[in-house]
Image: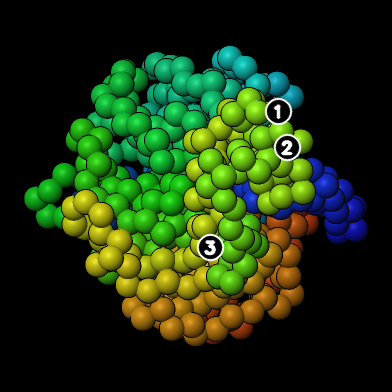
């Protein structure tokens, strides 16, 4: 497809979104979307580390604890559909990222109504098996989302996949189904997007949605629920969580959601501590560095400092707008107000009636602020006042997750503006668009071997050097739409475009 054709398709998608939403609060799910952390000692499966002649793994969305970082060398700078390609395998589309075990690659895909899990030989790209998932229903999704957005997760012995149209399934390395666990139907305006993760003997999945949000842990061995914790404060979003563990303590699950970053103990799902001040819709995956978690959220332009709009409390709004006196506010009754622009996003049951809870969510969403927050890890209860170290509120990403590499925090917003920070202080080191790769961004940046890779929607891959300066060393062109965050291990980059999975490396 030519650049012009792609641009024209994108244009129509954008126009559609603008036309239907007025305020584009939305988000796509794109597992491409979110990010993570290193330094989470003791919680990475052994398969994340290279040992002996066994290649290292990238076992979950964004690799080791969602960090986007790999320990490897000899990665290429220049690559493309015809350059430094070790192998290429054509596949049906899906936004899920390739996930690696020592010998295998897993990803999900869809074709029409069919939902697939693929297993490829990591060395050759050969498809070893493909399994079709059952489909209980067709979930509503944003046009920028896909039925195969959440990424698989593996412990090297089995793989776990989540499809919003069914639930979670587990297969062994030969493709035998071990168990299935139905979940949903869901109530997420954009469709689901968070990927499952593994910790100890559990598969953990955050199911945030308009109403009845929860986080659930299933036993890896049989898919039975170990614990389930409701998240009544969450009314949107699809961030994939990360883990944090202190010596001698159980691991904690760190979940960004509407308004709050929340830590749960993975043993029981009990809520331990939280920080408020987040956006009402969280989509990125956070990252950890030096005891600090970096978490970003973006809702809409109205959530920029200085742009906030106030609406009256529900009682007052009823007096003013409830023309038929039924105690609810219909779309027509609030026509011309900010509530009308936000109606689809805050009418959480999509029932055409705004009740007190919907209205309170509207007020909270309007009052929330886009931002990147640096939060000191740990504590108990509400840690907002003591743990937020710094925050930044401009050019904040909606979907792409951040990256910390060599003490520099990077974020790329959906419009392609990259900001680099001194991670310790929040001082901005550089900001701007990536020369030669000015585009929309859904995939999250990844880094290794002294190189930072950004992948744009049109398949432009910008490579920059560490240090905080945004000088582009090279722009590679994969000439296909790209939403999935690439995987890196053992001198190889696994990059998924709409039509293919590439294994890239120096000969
Ligand atoms: Ca009414
Ligand atoms: Ca409602």
Question: Would you say 333 lies left or right of 2 here?
Answer: left
Q: Quadrant of residue 346?
A: top right
Closest to the observer: 454 or 242? 242
Q: Secondary structure at mark 2?
A: loop
Alpha carbon of mark 2 to alpha carbon of mark 1: how far? 9 Å
Mark 2 Cβ inside 8 Å of ligand 1: yes
Residue at the location (35% across, 31% down)? 230
Left or right of residue 114, residue 168 in this image: left
Q: Which residue is mark 2?
A: 333
483 sits to left or right of 49: right
Is 141 positioned to the left or the right of 153 in the image?
A: right
How far from the left and from the top, in percent, is residue 335?
A: 76, 43
Q: Are marks 2 and 3 in contact (CB under 8 Å)?
A: no
Q: Nearer the viewer, mark 2 or mark 3?
A: 2
Please rate how many residues cluster around mark 1, counting C-alpha atoms within 10 Å: few if below 14, some from 14 to 19, many from 20: few
Asked whether the beta carbons under mark 2 and mark 1 sit within 8 Å of each other, the answer is yes
Image point (32%, 67%), residue name: 388
Residue 430: image location, x then y, percent: 55, 83
The verdict on label 1 being within 8 Å of ligand 1 is yes
User: Which mark's residue is nearer the viewer, 2 or 1?
Assistant: 1
Q: Is residue 415 visible?
A: yes
Q: What residue is shown at x 41% (from left), y 66% (from top)?
A: 373
Label 2: few (<14), some (14–19) or many (≥20) C-alpha neighbours in 10 Å: some
Q: Which residue is mark 1?
A: 324
Which mark is drawn over residue 370? 3
What colour scheme has been applied to the protein in the rendered image? rainbow
* Position above or below: 15 against 355: below
Mark 3–mark 1 Cα distance, whole angstroms, equals 36 Å
Say which element carries label 3: loop
């Amino acid at each position: 497809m030519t650049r012009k054709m792609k641009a024209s398709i994108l244009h129509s998608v954008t126009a559609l979104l603008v036309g239907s939403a007025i305020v584009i609060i939305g988000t796509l799910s794109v597992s491409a979307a979110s990010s993570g952390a290193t330094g989470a000692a003791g919680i990475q499966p052994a398969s994340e580390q290279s040992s002996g002649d066994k290649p290292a793994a990238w076992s979950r969305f964004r690799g080791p604890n969602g960090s986007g970082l790999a320990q490897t060398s000899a990665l290429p700078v220049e690559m493309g559909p015809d350059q430094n390609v070790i192998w290429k395998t054509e596949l049906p589309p899906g936004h899920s990222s390739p996930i690696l075990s020592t010998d295998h690659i897993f990803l999900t895909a869809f074709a029409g109504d069919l939902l697939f899990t693929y297993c490829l030989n990591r060395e050759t790209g050969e498809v070893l098996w493909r399994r079709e998932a059952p489909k209980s229903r067709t979930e509503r999704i944003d046009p920028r989302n896909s039925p195969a957005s959440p990424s698989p997760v593996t412990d090297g012995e089995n793989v776990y996949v989540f499809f919003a149209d069914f639930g979670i399934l587990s297969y062994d390395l030969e493709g035998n189904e071990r168990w299935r666990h139905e979940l949903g139907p869901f109530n997420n305006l954009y469709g689901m997007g968070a990927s499952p993760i593994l910790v100890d003997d559990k598969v953990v999945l955050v199911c945030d949605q308009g109403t009845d949000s929860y986080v659930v842990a299933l036993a890896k061995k049989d898919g039975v629920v170990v614990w389930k914790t409701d998240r009544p404060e969450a009314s949107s979003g699809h961030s994939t969580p990360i883990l944090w563990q202190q010596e001698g303590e159980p691991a904690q699950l760190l979940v960004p959601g509407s308004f709050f970053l929340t830590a749960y103990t993975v043993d029981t799902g009990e809520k331990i501590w939280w920080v408020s001040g987040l956006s009402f819709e969280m989509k990125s995956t956070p990252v950890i560095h030096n005891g600090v978690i970096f978490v970003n959220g973006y809702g809409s332009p109205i959530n920029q400092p200085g742009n906030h709009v106030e609406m009256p409390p529900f009682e007052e709004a009823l007096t003013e707008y409830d023309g038929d006196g039924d105690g609810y506010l219909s779309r027509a009754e609030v026509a011309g107000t900010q509530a009308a622009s936000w109606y689809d996003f805050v009418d959480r049951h999509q029932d055409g009636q705004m009740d007190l809870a919907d209205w309170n969510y509207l007020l909270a969403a309007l009052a929330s602020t886009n931002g990147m927050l640096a939060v000191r890890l740990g504590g108990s209860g509400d840690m907002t006042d003591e743990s937020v170290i710094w925050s930044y509120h401009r050019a904040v990403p909606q979907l792409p997750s951040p990256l910390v590499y060599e003490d520099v925090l990077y974020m790329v917003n959906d419009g392609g503006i990259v900001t680099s920070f001194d991670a310790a202080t929040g001082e901005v080191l550089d900001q701007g668009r990536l020369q030669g790769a000015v585009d929309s961004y859904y995939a999250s940046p990844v880094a290794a071997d002294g190189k930072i890779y950004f992948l744009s929607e049109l398949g432009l891959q910008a490579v920059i050097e560490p240090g905080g300066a945004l000088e582009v060393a090279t722009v590679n062109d994969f000439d296909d739409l790209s939403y999935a965050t690439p995987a890196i291990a053992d001198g190889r980059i696994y990059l998924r475009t709409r039509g293919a999975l590439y294994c890239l490396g120096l000969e």
